[in-house]
Amino acid sequence: MSLIEQIQRDTKEAMKRRDKRRVGALRMLSSALKNSEIEAGRPLTGEEEIAVLRRQLKQREESAEAYRKVGREEQAEAEASEAGIVREYLPAPLSPEEMERIVDRAIEETEASGMKDMGAVMGRATALSEGRAEGRELAALVRSRLQ
């Protein structure tokens, strides 16, 4: 079952339970996925679906932070709640040890020798992480290993 189908099924269940907040968040996810499909002109791959969800998660987290900075705690909580719902559909994140092994493997496979090879290492590490690692965290680890 694709992610879009799973979200549509979960939306129906949330509607039956009259969970307005969850219904709203799931509809937002479904819409983002459908829009990406339309832009691509074809059904999305699993990796592309995960990328859309990661963008949605990042957007919700940034919005929650912005609301907190201006003292709008209620809106911040709503965004944080939506972020939690998005996280349910993302693969489990890698542990720090797993990320270190992936970065070490990427460095070894690309035969990286310094910062000039960061792009190649990041590309390989991203592929090896299969969408389970945050780009910022991977980049920080790669940078520390290459320096």
Image: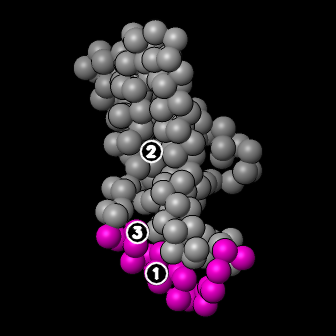
Q: Quadrant of the C terminus?
A: bottom right
The residue segment tinted magenta is: 97-116
Instruction: Look at the numbered disc 1 and give the secondary structure of its residue.
Output: helix
Pair 3/2: label in front: 3
Residue at image point 66% right, 38% down: 35
114 relative position to 83: left or right:
right
Dividing the picture into quadrants, the one containing residue 78 is: top left
Q: Is residue 125 visible?
A: no
The type of residue carrying mark 2 is Glu
Tell me residue 141's x, y (percent): 49, 66
Categorize mark 3 by other alpha carbons within 10 Å: few (<14), some (14-19), many (20+): many
Residue bearing the label numbered 1:
104
In-front residue for pair 12/77: 77
| Residue marked by disc 3 | 99
Q: Are marks 3 and 1 in contact (CB under 8 Å)?
A: no
Q: Residue furthest front?
A: 147
On screen, 48 above or below 86?
below
In contact (CB < 8 Å): disc 3 and disc 2: no
Query: Given the image, on which type of amino acid does mark 3 rest?
Result: Met
Q: CA distance from mark 1 to mark 2?
A: 36 Å
Image spot of residue 28 (x, y percent):
52, 28
Residue 11: say if magenta: no
* Marks 3/2: CA–CA distance: 30 Å
N-term-proximal mark, 3 vs 1 = 3
Q: CA distance from mark 3 to mark 1?
A: 9 Å
- The label on residue 5 is 2
